Amino acid sequence: MKHSLLIRLVACLLLGVLLSALCFSLSSCEIQPGERETTVFIATDIHLFSDNLLSEDNQRYTKDKFVSDGRIQEYDYQLMEALVEQVNAQIPEYLILTGDLTFNGERDSHLEVARLLSGVNPDTKVLVIPGNHDVYSINAVSVIKDKMEAVDSITAEDFREIYADFGYEDALYYDELSLSYIWELDDDKWALMLDTSLSRYNEENDYQIVGGGIEESTLAWLEEKLIYAKENGIDVISFSHHNLLVHNQLFEYNYTMRNSGEVLALFAEYEVKLNFSGHLHIQSIKNTQVDGTTIYDVSGGSLLDYGNRYGRLDIYDNCYSYESKPLPVSEKIREHSFEVFSTKYYYKTFLTYKTSLGAEDAERATRVLSEINAYYFDGSYEQIRSLVWKNRALIGLIERNTKDYDSSYVSSIINVERENQHSILIER
């Protein structure tokens, strides 16, 4: 009898542990969304290059040859138009773009982005912030008849004027010394639109500054507004171009805000739990604990990179629910996007393994790594784990022939965590 009772007690304890683990992995066990209040669509790194700056008869300088990072630049208009169509089909309350709206800050490219955004249904409010490519660029060019020439970029004042209808007019508060502002989503919610670009220093440094952060004057402005928000029961959701958290240790410099620690301290003190960023072109969700507050940074992939994703944030009266979604584009574009992204990585990597593995094994290894890399940037970690399992012998070969494997980029894309990179559900 005692033995039977002990078995039942152990069984109950094990069941409890299993149920707890299940509920921990499925946030729906912990949080049941209440009443939906606001929906926000989020996209980033559109990098549109105006067709007016490019000759149709160019042979050397065509959009598909402009970049080496896997973007399908030749589809920039189509993807932007697809985003607008998706917004107009669902009519969320807001569409927010977190910077790098243009290829390299060309005035005409900005005018084209504003023109395309004017096609969004008036029932959806569009809000934008700049990225490191958008203002004071020293790399703005046109290519007419295969001749590349410098063209005007824009200043911060120009940005405010061009995007007056998209956040820079009628905002609740403005920071006078940057392009940061606060938009009142409704009576108890603010969108904190942070300008993290340091591009205004491009000319004096004589190079295009990639990294970003928030300067002291803007931090002071930010704290003043966060104090008011906390005292008045206002939830604040933050949006920036540069990442708030490190999404890959090898890409911390130039991608994470240079003074992210100061920003995190402010967010923890004033209970800002959620930031949306771009810049790294990766679909990734990270979180950290600061003084007992869990803060999330959701990095969105570039609209032009494989996955071609945007995000949907549903704000309920008790929680935030986020999900990244691929744009409904043609299978031709999706396949081409995957091919371009993986091929760019292939040619960068093949020679690394050719000497140690020989041409045949190097080709096999690099093909697998190219697919893994595309899935890594798309945040599709399940596909990575599946590929690693199916090719485990080859992965072992790669591990043994990768210099300093444990600290290498290759290791970081193979050994991915199990956390979902496409959705979160957290309490408000």
Image: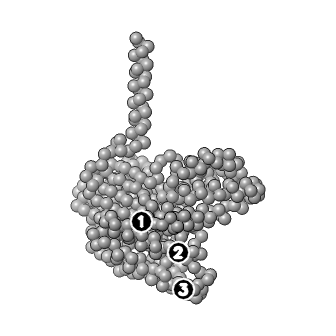
Sequence-first disc among 1 and 2: 1
Task: Count neighbours of disc 3 (C-alpha within 10 A) and say few if under 14, some if 14 to 19, many if 20 or more.
Answer: some
Label 1 to label 3: alpha-carbon separation: 28 Å
Question: In the rendered structure, which amino acid carries the disc numbered 3?
Answer: Ser
Which of 138/81 is in front? 81
Q: Secondary structure at mark 1?
A: strand
- How busy is the neighbourhood of tag 2: few (under 14 within 10 Å), some, or many (20 plus)? some
The mark nearer the N terminus, 1 or 3, is 1
Marks 2 and 3 close (CB-CB < 8 Å): no
Q: Is residue 159 above or below residue 244?
A: below
Residue shown at 40%/51% (left/top)? Answer: 424
Say the numbered circle drawn on residue 417.
none
| Foreground pick, 292 / 107 | 107
- Of circles 1 and 2, the one toward us is 2
Figure disc tally: 3
Under circle 3, the secondary element is: loop
For disc 2, the marked residue is: 74
Colour scheme of this structure image? one colour
Q: Which residue is tagged 1?
A: 43
Residue 172, image x and y in percent?
27, 68
Label 1 amino acid?
Ala
Classify mark 2: helix, strand or loop.
helix
Which residue is most to the front?
331
Q: Tell me the residue at 59%/75% (across/down).
A: 65
Whether residue 214 is visible, yes or no, is: no
For residue 55, which numbered disc appears in the image?
3
Image quadrant containing the N terminus:
top left
